[in-house]
Image (cartoon, grey):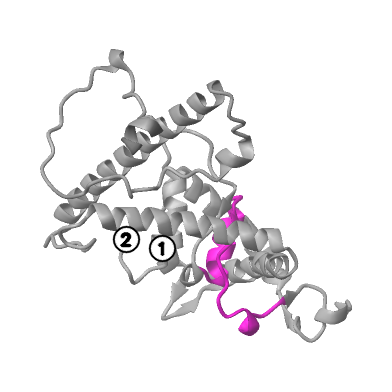
Amino acid sequence: MVPGTLRDSLFILDAIHNLDGGPRPETIITDTASYSDLVFGLFAICGYQFSPRIADLADMRLWRTNTRASYGPLEDMSRHVIRLDRIRAHWGDMLRVAGSLTMGTVRAYDLIRMLSADGRPTGLGEAFVHYGRIFKTLHLLQFLHDAGYRRMIGAQLNVQEARHRLARKIAFGNRGQLRQRYREGMEDQLGSLGLALNAVIWWNSLYLDAAVQQLREQGFPVTDEMCARLSPIQYEHINFLGRYAFTRADVATGLRPFHQPTELSG
């Protein structure tokens, strides 16, 4: 359960460090409401590239580290200065914070409260803010310059939205709303939703792979470029209404055979 009063990107950082196994992502992509200079700093100190979608791009600031350098066409856009001296003064503590986050001894959304007092960042918090502005500026410059980078962010967010649409479709009764009164009930409801969602995606993945293999055996040139456009987050073929009986499947029988086009036309 994630409260709406905190940035959900901090919970993403905690979730990454709590992964049981497998490779961790190198790039974290979120929507517009999930970033701040401090969040950029926390992700960067832990070794992740934070790449949120920027909505009000014209209102963004670019930051510089050298007041004497000339930035050419970006000279007027990068008048604000990053205080490297404040980063150096707290660098040891910043590394200790990174170690605590990575080891899970402190949570990111708890750390935010420790890095600010009365709504203003502490000395350590301000060091993280200036450190984050370095990577925020790099992200903005790449976002402006690289069309492929913008498409990558948009494509990943589209996948996330497709996943949310499927989840709302599965949670038909309450239209995706949590109606439980207590946190445990909400977590149980979300756990059941996640189980059903994973089952749908797993089923789609199995049969998509089987369909590709069958087409290739029949001589149809299914290329990797075609497969890259396939998505298991589809639900037009699934009936979400009615009663269902869940029985243990006989693994030895394998997957069900595909319908032939002649059978469908008849």
Question: Which residue is pictured at 40% across the width and 30% down the height?
Answer: 206
Q: In which quarter of the image is residue 54?
A: bottom right
Q: Quadrant of residue 259?
A: top left
Q: Look at the image and say whether residue 55 sits in the magenta stretch.
A: yes
Residue 8 image label = 1
Q: Nearer the viewer, residue 117 or 41?
A: 41
When the figure is inspected, residue 124 is found, relative to residue 209, above or below; the finding is below
Q: What stretch is highlighted in magenta?
A: 35-62
Q: Look at the image and say whether residue 100 sits in the magenta stretch.
A: no
Residue 97 % position (x, y): 52, 54
From the image, tell me which residue sits under label 2. Answer: 2
Q: Which of the marked residues, 1 or 2, is nearer the chain's N terminus?
A: 2
When the figure is inspected, residue 2 is found, relative to residue 227, above or below; the finding is below
- Residue kind at label 2, given as amino acid type: Val
Residue 103 % position (x, y): 47, 43
- Residue kind at label 1, given as amino acid type: Asp
Q: What element carries label 2?
A: loop
Question: Which residue is pictured at 44% across the width and 34% down the height?
Answer: 208
Query: Whole-Å distance between the Cαs marked 1 and 2?
Result: 7 Å
Q: Given contact means CB atoms under 8 Å apart, are the residues at marks 1 and 2 in contact?
A: yes
Q: Is mark 1 on a helix, strand or loop?
A: helix
Question: Which residue is pictured at 32% across the width and 69% down the height?
Answer: 4
Q: Is residue 147 left or right of residue 110?
A: right
Residue that sits furthest to the bottom in the current view = 76
Q: Is residue 209 left or right of residue 152?
A: left
Q: Which of 89 and 129 is in front in this view?
A: 129
Crowding near the residue tagged with mark 2, few <14, some 14–19, many ≥20 C-alpha atoms within 10 Å:
few
